[in-house]
Image: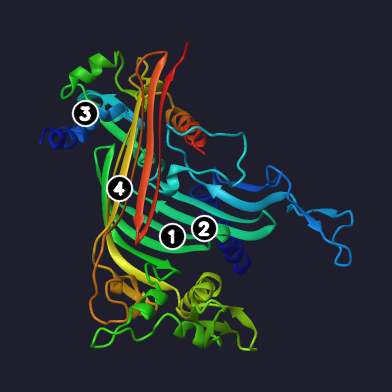
């Protein structure tokens, strides 16, 4: 009897598990594509080679040796691995017979999806461009239901130093089958202290009398340089007064203040900024978000417009708030700061006016913090 | 002002007669064929509509419905497949299965 009960329990258990895995496959993995892809391309090459002449120091008039000084980069490559389950909207055409991770689909930016349920993209790649190697990655997971949208995203673009993470939860209200509005909350992170320019603040600091607290040359002193005053008279009676500059080892690096500004000061400004920026941790903030989506498609006319508006009620929960974007009009201060709106909208429309004539418009605009990203295209096709 | 009115009315225009938009499973029936209808619950992830001939006779005329009940699968305003009941007012037994297969093919084409 015991054995029979055990057997029955096992059978039920296997059946339940089997059903569970069947559902899991159907909901999560069905239609997903696993890909490994790469490409190799000819590297950038200057239009004309650069040459220089190597001079024999012992004989300036000997036949010179001409040296090819052109930078020859090794081939560019990209190799990536990923799994994707992203539905295309009906107006989107699969560009190739295969996926290689280079696809840019509207599913990644529009608030709602072409299908309900799970969609995701997990992509990791390594690339080399002009001899420099980078790592890029994108992890995107979204679940769209009739009345909800849950989205997680992480993106890293190595060649531009871009790193971004976000998580959002929204309630969704469909209005008919073609329009939906949504509202919820979004948490986002950003690496950069947007708009924060430490050197500008340092140089512009003034005391109560309006005098500069940190004169420009004091930045040189901060990095071990020193300026030495000199005055000289030439044989015609002209007098020159200036400051020449030496580094920490006493080596002359500039003969005048102007030369120091031209040759050294720019690098010091960047060095100062980088040192201050490196001290700041990544930021993360949370804010309410609303959005809408309109989608209509027929063979002759399609329209997909969407918008996301992150409302001006941002609350930082990670990073030094004194230098957060909230304090952009008064760096270093504390308090509520100045709120701002972030938004994104897109429009894709196409109209085949006749068998031979069609007009197509696509565009997307994103404003996040002080960053603006936009792209647009318009086309008029007339087939003869 | 005119532009705003057009913009506000545009979604309403788009939603008009939208029972054929995207993936839609539409059942055309009548009070006396209630028992012969199939359940549209398995297709809840898509648009589902059940029209009664006494309430929406125009749709029946427009879709040239000759048998009751009739189930039609539409995709982007185009008819994909139609299931018509036989003389005993019964839909084919495999209606749900065939419908699912057709919807699967449509979904697959999006990935």
Q: Earlier in the sequence, mark 2 or mark 1?
A: 2
Q: Report whether mark 4 lies on the same chain as mark 3.
A: no
Q: Nearer the viewer, mark 2 or mark 4?
A: 4
Q: Nearer the viewer, mark 3 or mark 1?
A: 1
On the image, the x and y values in percent for residue B74 come to 37, 26
Q: Which residue is mark 4?
A: A307
User: Which badge, 4 or 1, comes first in the chain's sequence?
Assistant: 1
Q: Residue A61 sits in which quadrant?
A: bottom right
**Tag 4, which secondary structure?**
strand
Q: Residues under labels 4 and 3: Cα distance?
A: 22 Å
**Residue under mark 1: which chain is it in?**
A
Category of crowding for the residue at label 4, using alpha-carbon neighbours closer than 10 angstroms: few (below 14), some (14–19), many (at least 20): many
The circle drawn on residue B16 is 3
Cβ–Cβ under 8 Å for marks 2 and 1: yes
Report which residue position mark 1 lands on.
A152
Mark 4 or 3: the one toward you: 4
Number of the front mark, 4 or 1: 4
Mark 4 and mark 3 residues within 8 Å of each other at the beta carbon: no
Is residue A297 visible from the viewing direction of this image?
Answer: no
The disc label shown at residue A139, or none:
2
Query: How dense is the environment of label 2, judged by Cα within 10 Å: few (below 14), some, or many (20 and up)?
Result: some
């Amino acid at each position: 009897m015991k054995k029979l009960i055990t057997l029955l329990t096992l059978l039920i258990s296997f059946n339940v598990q089997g059903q569970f895995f069947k559902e899991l496959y159907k909901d999560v993995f069905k239609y997903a594509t696993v890909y490994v892809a790469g490409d190799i391309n000819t590297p950038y090459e200057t239009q004309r080679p650069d040459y220089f002449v190597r001079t024999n120091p012992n004989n300036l008039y000997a036949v010179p040796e001409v040296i090819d000084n052109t930078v020859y980069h090794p081939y560019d490559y990209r190799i990536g691995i990923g799994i994707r389950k992203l539905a295309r909207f009906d107006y989107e055409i699969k560009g190739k017979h295969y996926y290689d991770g280079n696809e840019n689909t509207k599913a990644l930016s529009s608030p709602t999806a072409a299908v309900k349920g799970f969609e995701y993209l997990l992509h990791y790649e390594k690339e080399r461009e002009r001899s420099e190697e980078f790592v890029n990655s994108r992890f995107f997971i979204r679940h769209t239901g009739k009345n909800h949208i849950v989205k997680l995203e992480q993106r890293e673009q190595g060649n531009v130093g871009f790193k971004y993470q976000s998580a959002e939860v929204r309630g969704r209200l469909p209005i008919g089958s073609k329009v939906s509005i949504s509202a919820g909350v979004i948490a986002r992170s950003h690496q950069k202290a947007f708009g924060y320019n430490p050197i500008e603040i340092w140089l512009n600091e003034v005391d109560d009398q309006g005098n500069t607290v940190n004169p420009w040359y004091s930045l040189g002193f901060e990095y071990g340089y020193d300026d030495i005053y000199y005055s000289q008279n030439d044989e015609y009676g002209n007098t020159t007064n200036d400051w020449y500059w030496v580094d920490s080892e006493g080596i002359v690096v500039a003969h005048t203040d102007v030369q120091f500004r031209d040759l050294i000061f720019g690098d010091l400004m960047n060095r100062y900024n980088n040192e201050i920026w490196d001290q700041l941790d990544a930021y993360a903030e949370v804010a309410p978000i609303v959005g809408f989506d309109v989608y209509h498609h027929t063979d002759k006319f399609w329209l997909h417009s969407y918008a996301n508006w992150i409302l001006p009620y941002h609350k930082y929960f990670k990073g030094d708030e004194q230098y957060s974007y909230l304090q952009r009009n008064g760096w270093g201060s504390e308090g509520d700061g100045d709120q701002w709106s972030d938004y994104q909208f897109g429009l894709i429309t196409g109209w085949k006016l006749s068998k031979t004539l069609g007009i197509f418009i696509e565009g997307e605009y994103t404003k996040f913090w002080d960053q603006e990203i936009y792209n647009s295209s318009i086309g008029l096709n007339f087939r003869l | 002002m005119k532009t705003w009115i057009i913009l506000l009315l545009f979604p309403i225009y788009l939603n008009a007669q939208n029972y054929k938009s995207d993936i839609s499973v539409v059942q055309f029936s009548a009070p006396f064929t209630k028992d012969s209808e199939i359940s549209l619950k398995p297709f809840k992830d898509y648009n589902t509509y059940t029209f009664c001939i006494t309430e929406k006779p125009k749709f029946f005329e427009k879709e040239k419905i000759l048998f009751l009940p009739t189930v039609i699968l539409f995709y982007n305003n185009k008819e994909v497949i139609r299931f018509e009941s036989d003389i005993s007012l019964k839909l084919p037994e495999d209606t749900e299965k065939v419908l699912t297969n057709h919807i699967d093919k449509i979904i697959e084409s999006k990935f």
